[in-house]
Image: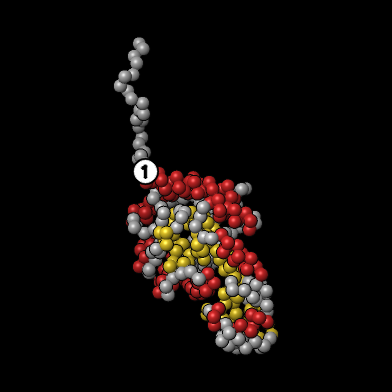
């Protein structure tokens, strides 16, 4: 099982907690997925503090690691402050760092991302950066102190699956010893299996499960696909070829005419 | 004095951040607070003095991806 910042986890699926039909369905999806890490956010609380309390209790009862995010932050200062506030609440150094650069695609602002990552690692945070599949940005993030990378495979919530397999394959080859998690854009279990077959360590997804007709069943389907993709990578897959290769032996074939 | 809490203006008297939270009935160990863009640790709310026109953010855990 993979290790992230020295913590070994029980699953290669990281699951978001947003957009489920109900808290009970979220809890069931988490249980059936077998995930060991869920992502959460921080938002303004109404007076009385009732909204977050119920959700916080639910998360505590799930018994999994919490990965707070800085979703919706469009500047370095916003992301850094949100990370600091998240650490105060969740008592974890883990932070899924998002610095959004484009309103329509939610593409990371990679310049701000690297800057924020440097600030946060300097304060002891263990940063999971949501980034593009750009190798130079990845290098900068590692130089900034990140020990995990989370490249997107398509825009958040788009469900289109990996748009650039060659780039993901190159990133895997370039950073053989760095835990790599594909984050964002996965729509189907087959998408997750595909990126896992490239040798990725894990997949983070949310909408594909939360938006399914049966989120709990879909969570389990994703868990199976991710494990299958991981196992297939380890087993060594055939390289594709253009011409046929008979699978049945030719020797001993009957001659009827 | 005037205080901006989660974007809403309030006219009230509160010496410390902890007093403000109590006055507005924010309660719970899951709250995160910032004043004027700086984190105020939960342990420091009792000693963090407020001044006129401070901007306070009170956040709590929510669903996220």
**Residue visible at 61% across and 48% down?**
A214
Q: Position of residue B61 (x, y in %)?
A: 58, 68
Residue at position x 64%, y 75% in the image: B27
Q: Name the residue under label 1.
A: A235
Residue A79 left/right relative to A28:
left
- Image location of residue A75, percent across then percent down: 50, 71
- Residue at 39 percent of width and 50 percent of height: A199
Report the residue at 36% width, 43% height from top.
Answer: A235
Q: In this view, does A153 lie above or below B47?
A: above
Measuring from the top left, give residue B51's x and y in whole percent. Answer: 60, 88
In the displayed image of the protein, which residue is found farthest to the left?
Answer: A251
Q: In this view, does A232 lie above or below B31?
A: above
Query: Which of A87/A41 is in front?
Result: A87
The quadrant holding residue B44 is bottom right
Query: Which quarter of the figure has residue A140?
Result: bottom left
Say if residue A150 shows up in the picture: yes
Q: Quadrant of the N terminus of chain A?
A: bottom left
């Amino acid at each position: 099982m993979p290790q992230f910042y020295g913590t070994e986890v029980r699953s290669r699926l990281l699951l978001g907690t947003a957009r489920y039909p109900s808290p009970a369905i979220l809890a069931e999806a988490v249980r059936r997925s077998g995930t060991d890490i869920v992502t959460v956010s921080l938002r303004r609380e109404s007076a009385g503090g009732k909204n977050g309390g119920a959700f916080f209790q639910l998360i505590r009862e799930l018994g999994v690691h919490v990965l707070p995010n800085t979703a919706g932050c469009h500047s370095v200062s916003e992301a850094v402050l949100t990370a600091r506030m998240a650490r105060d609440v969740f008592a974890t150094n883990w932070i899924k760092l998002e610095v959004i650069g484009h309103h329509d695609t939610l593409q990371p602002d990679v310049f701000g991302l690297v800057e924020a990552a440097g600030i946060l690692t300097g304060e002891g945070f263990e940063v999971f950066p949501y980034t593009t599949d750009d190798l130079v940005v990845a290098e900068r993030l590692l130089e900034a102190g990140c020990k995990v990378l989370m490249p997107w495979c398509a825009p958040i919530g788009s469900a289109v699956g990996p748009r650039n397999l060659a780039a993901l394959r190159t990133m895997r080859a370039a950073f053989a010893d760095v835990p790599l998690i594909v984050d964002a854009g996965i729509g189907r279990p087959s998408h997750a299996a595909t990126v896992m077959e490239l040798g990725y360590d894990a997949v983070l997804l949310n909408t594909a499960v939360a938006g399914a007709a049966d989120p709990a069943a879909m969570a389990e389907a994703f868990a199976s696909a991710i494990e299958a993709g991981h196992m297939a990578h380890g087993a060594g897959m055939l390289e594709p070829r253009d011409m046929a290769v008979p699978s049945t032996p030719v020797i001993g074939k009957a001659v009827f005419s | 004095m005037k205080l901006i809490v989660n974007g809403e203006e309030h006219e009230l008297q509160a010496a410390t951040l902890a007093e403000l939270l109590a006055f507005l009935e924010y309660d719970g160990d899951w709250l995160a607070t910032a004043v004027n863009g700086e984190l105020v640790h939960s342990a420091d709310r009792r000693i963090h003095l407020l001044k006129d026109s401070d901007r306070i953010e009170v956040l709590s855990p929510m669903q996220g991806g």
